Image: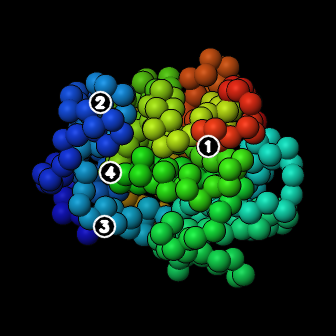
Amino acid sequence: MPSGTGSGVAPSRPRNERCEQCSGLAHVTVLRNVCDPITLERFEIQVCRDCGLARTAPQPVHIESYYSQRYYGSRHWITTAYCLWRRIRVVNLTFGEVRAHAVLDVGCGDGAFLEKARQQGWRVIGTEIGVGRLSIAGIRVASSLADVDERFDCITCWHVLEHLPNPLASLRAMRSRLTADGALVLSVPDAGGLQSRLFGRFWFHRDVPRHLFHFDLRSLRLTLESAGFRVVKVWHHELEYDLFGWIQSALNGMLRTPNVLFDALTGHPRRTGYLPIVVSAVFAAVMFPLAFALTVVTTLLRQGGTLIVSARPTGSVAGGTEQPIQTL
């Protein structure tokens, strides 16, 4: 388990001084005392001066110890249904709703997206370290990309890239498993969006140290290009992620305990008295209209809390030139 308790600073660990994306040596610390909402250890956010990729520092050697049972929660069924509908829609917008393709979902979690894609006529395979969490029968799940030899028309990577210790190498491995005209569809929190810049170390989607890297559109594009991809479509929000990010981030700046509302909604054990939970619920109800309006405005300004990108292998004739799309 993580060694820190209370509000202690995470112990120093060996770190790679070179940027994992461009091998640059010049990093600047842009945020200090960023709190892990689970262990309450403190970390920094450093940004590469050359390519803009941000990383958590220090990066834990045994990152798996930060994925305790408290990390995993359950969505409300309406949120789950909407999330799956949106992800299928993004894939369909990329492929023009052509069926009978093969899709690989990297970091497939509980397999819900794979099951939805299978219902849409896709042939599906997933990868997941914790394969024991899967509850859907009949879906093949490998423990890593190294165990997958097939080629796929589509590879999806929903809020996974920021968790990987070497995003560039992982993207290159994904590219090697795409067909010539295949597509990669991925999503990450937008570390360059207004939500991230406004809330700083209190931003709900910072989630150190599980988020080892923090992408804005520029650094994500550079990483994809270095891995042999070209970006063809960009979306600048995921409604429920952005909405909740506004509310919980504001609460994180107000309350001593982080993610009180999130814990209550996802069934995590209570870490506070009932008053902070009541305060959080009342605040959420009052702030919801403003959070929705901010989500709309930041989406239109391309400054939302989430990036969704579809990319094709360099040299592919499919997909055309980049087409930013603002709404889902």
Residue 290 coordinates in the image, percent (x, y): 63, 25
- Dot 1 falls on a residue whose secondary structure is strand
Residue in the image at 48% along x and 43% along y: 227
| Mark seen at residue 48 | 2
Residue in the image at 58% along x and 28% along y: 304
Mark 3 or mark 1: which comes first in sequence?
3
Mark 2 or mark 1: which comes first in sequence?
2
| Residue 239: quarter of image | top right
Looking at the rendered structure, the kind of residue marked 4 is Pro
Q: Nearer the viewer, mark 2 or mark 3?
A: 2
Instruction: Say above or below: 4 vs 246.
Output: below
The quarter of the rendered structure image containing the C terminus is top right
Looking at the rendered structure, the kind of residue marked 3 is Ser
Q: Which residue is mark 1?
A: 313
Q: Which residue is mark 4?
A: 209
> Answer yes or no: do the residues labelled 2 and 1 have beta carbons within 8 Å?
no
Q: Nearer the viewer, residue 125 or 225?
A: 225
